[in-house]
Image (spheres, grey):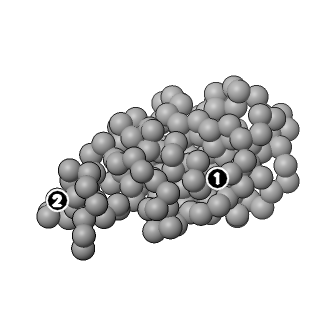
Amino acid sequence: MISQLFILSPRGDVIIKKEFRYDVPKTAPEIFFRAVKFWKDGEKAPAVFSEDGVNYLHIKAGGLFVTATTRKNVSASHVLELLHRVAGVVKDYCGVMNEDALRKNSILTYELLDEMLDYGYAQSTSTESLKVHVFNEPATPASDGAGHSLVSGKAAGGKKSRG
């Protein structure tokens, strides 16, 4: 379904980039950012647009651009919902959805993307169902005050809690 998924900073820096089909140019993040930054007539770029035969679908989450590309004719609402779920799961695991959290937790983010998407097709996008498949801990986990990570059910020391 999707060819690439990438997350860009507000300055256009690539924070996370995952290739699925290799049918879209590797320069797609730069093309996307230029198109969004300098959209026609000074208006805000739409969530879905096409540039040189590549469809770009994006949302903004925590000031970051979460973007999918494809050459296929896909359901825009389906892909936009997928992007919202990706952003939500990353936020659930990292505590916040911002550039610093993603850079500190890039390995975790890639592991989450591997579990959520298979060859560009959505798989499991629920935080609950991903718990059994994701083994990396966030760099700065949110805690409930008792030393337990809110996402994994593991104690701050990395050991599985019994409760």
Q: Are marks 2 and 1 in contact (CB under 8 Å)?
A: no
Task: State how many labels appear.
Answer: 2
Q: Is residue 141 left or right of residue 83?
A: left
Looking at the rendered structure, the secondary structure element under dot 2 is loop
Q: Residues within 10 Å of mark 2 (few under 14, many from 20)?
A: some
* x then y, percent, for residue 4: 69, 41
Q: Nearer the viewer, residue 129 or 13?
A: 129
* Residue at the left extreme, as displayed: 146
- The residue lying at 33 percent from left, 54 percent from top is 95
Q: Which mark is residue 117?
A: 1
* x then y, percent, for residue 10: 47, 36
User: Amino acid under label 1?
Assistant: Leu
Relative to 8, is 113 above or below? below
User: Amino acid under label 2?
Assistant: Gly
Q: Residues within 10 Å of mark 1 (few under 14, many from 20)?
A: many
Q: Nearer the viewer, residue 84 or 152?
A: 152
Relative to 72, is 18 above or below? above
Q: Which mark is residue 54?
A: none
Decide which of tag 2 and tag 1 comes sooner along the chain: 1
Q: How far apart are the alpha carbons under marks 2 and 1? A: 31 Å
Q: Is residue 55 left or right of residue 131?
A: right
- The residue lying at 71 percent from left, 49 percent from top is 120
- The residue lying at 51 percent from left, 46 percent from top is 111
Q: Can residue 102 be seen here?
A: no
Looking at the rendered structure, the secondary structure element under dot 1 is strand
* x then y, percent, for residue 7: 54, 40
**Which residue is denoted by mark 2 in the rendering?**
147
- The residue lying at 74 percent from left, 59 percent from top is 76
Q: Can residue 19 be seen here?
A: yes
Location of the C terminus (image quadrant): bottom left
Quadrant of the rendered structure where residue 6 is? Answer: top right
